[in-house]
Amino acid sequence: MTQVGSSIAGLLFAYKMLENFLPYEILRPIRRKIHKLTASFDPYLEITIPEYQGDGFKRSSAYASIERYLNIISTKQAQCLQANITGKTKKVVLTMAEGEEITDEYKGIKLWWKSDKITPNKQIISMHPHEDEKKYFTLTFHKRYRETVTEQYLKHVLDEGKAIEAKERQRKLYTNIKRRSWGTQSLWSHVVFEHPASFDTMAMDPLKKQEIMDDLMTFAKGKDYYAKIGKAWKRGYLLYGPPGTGKSTMIAAMANLLNYDIYDLELTSVKDNTQLRKLLIETSGKSIIVIEDIDCSLDLTGQRKKKKENEDGDGDGDNKIKIDGEKNERSQVTLSGLLNSIDGLWSACGNERIIVFTTNHVEKLDAALIRSGRMDKHIELSYCGFEAFKVLANNYLNIDSHHDLFEKIRGLLEETKITPADVAENLMPKSGTGEDKESCLLRLIEALEDVKKKEIEKKLKAEQLLNKKKLRKKLNKIIDVVGRNSLTKTRLHSN
Ligand SMILES: Nc1ncnc2c1ncn2[C@@H]1O[C@H](COP(=O)(O)OP(=O)(O)OP(=O)(O)O)[C@@H](O)[C@H]1O
């Protein structure tokens, strides 16, 4: 035993010496051999998770997830931490420093994690892209727990790490910008998505709001359910209503609730159906694909348009999108192309995606576009009611339940059609004027009374116009009858 021990010690010493001269590729197999030799005497097992896998070009996602998981434990345990500043938000993320060891416990099993790195000899030239730093984690545990650790614990660590990653990751807002030449590079460009909208601040009927939130949450948790029923994990929402009723705000609130990215698809910038399909396939999971004002992007007057184009000799059997570019370039995207691309997306890579169409004129949309299965839920966003107003009063003026002017406002809201955007505009205190809550509410009352007056005037005008039309119709009838009578008399006379 003494001899074996001293041989191992000798080998380890020789290995340490070699470490300074040999490149990582040669060191690795030697290291493995030494491990094999020592393992037969060691009751503990070791698993190594390197930062870069395979050809060394791609950072291992397992390493990233484990890093997130260990960050939580190491913040409490490690003696030496490394601070990293992330992204635009300048958030400080603490990770365990190299050489640090921390312990974890799972179902009564004790486990040791160590973060380490190999710094190769700088004099040796290597084509390896990450040569200067070879980080890795080692997990050590007793041999008798091999099964539980490899089959359960590692899965638990990866799942937890992924969940933390999803929570912490910066979400993105992607847009497809119009290009002068339709190149082959990625068609999306992105910025960090940091919209403050939430369902809490959405002004709408609370029951309807809850229903939408429940629907979204059911979808997000529905992975197994969608797999069970054999459907792609996706859901389509159609948001419709007049301008300023919160359609765009709701999309931001949806993304914030689910922690999804947003792909804002500008159809008028898409060259043709092939490019549209490419754009949709390039989108990632956990995302909301948005086509705003779909009635404006796509000529959806269906058959009428087709017929007219055919009459003009310009028809090719489908509706096309117009691009108002410098050369008035015309997009070749068609309605059927859009439908096929959406359906194709689900069959090709349809996991965890939401697609949202918005429109101010739902009646203009082609039935095929908004049928169930494509647009599963239709949500109407309408004029501001009293419940919605209360949310805005709380958002803008911190009035959480009641104010003496509320009753008057309730009455006026019942009689008028005003959008939440207009209500919000009137409730916002003007900067530098030192306006108090009451002044803002009084300004809203004034605006509501103004809207009411205009609506009455409009109604009166419409009534007058209708009466005029009716009168004209009556007069025409009388003239007609009188005319016919005189004609009959003349005929009788001449006979
Ligand atoms: N329901 C709402 N709840 C909270 N704020 C709202 C609501 N509706 C509108 N607003 C406010 O009005 C502004 C404009 O709303 P938004 O852009 O969401 O309306 P929209 O329906 O998408 O309009 P458009 O059809 O013109 O695109 C928002 O910035 C938001 O502050």
Image (cartoon, grey):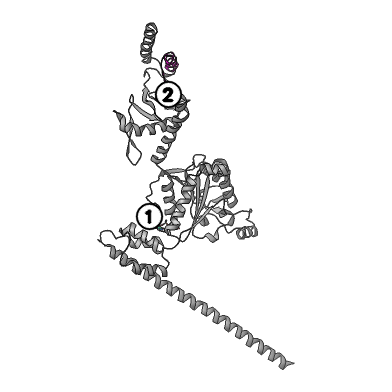
Question: What x and y, as percent, mark residue 83?
Answer: 31, 33
Which one is earlier in the sequence, the residue at label 1 or at label 2? 2
- In reply to whether residue 207 is colored magenta, the answer given is no
Query: Would you place residue 78 above or below residue 336 in this image?
Result: above
Dot 1 beta carbon under 8 Å from ligand 1: yes
Q: What element carries label 1?
A: loop
Towards the viewer: 315 or 434? 434
Three-letter code, disc 1: Thr
- Residue corresponding to mark 2: 48
Q: Distance between the residues labelled 1 and 2?
A: 47 Å
How would you rate the neighbour count of disc 1 (Cα within 10 Å): few for under 14, some for 14-19, many for 20 or more? some
The type of residue carrying mark 2 is Thr
The answer to whether 489 appears left or right of 370 in the picture is right
Q: Is residue 368 left or right of residue 397?
A: right
The numbered dot on residue 201 is 1
Kindly indicate whether the residue at mark 2 contacts the one at mark 1 (C-beta within 8 angstroms): no
Query: Magenta stretch?
Result: 26-47
Image location of residue 98, percent across then percent down: 34, 25
Residue visible at 34% across and 57% down? 395
* Image quarter (top left, top right, bottom left or bottom right) of the N terminus: top left
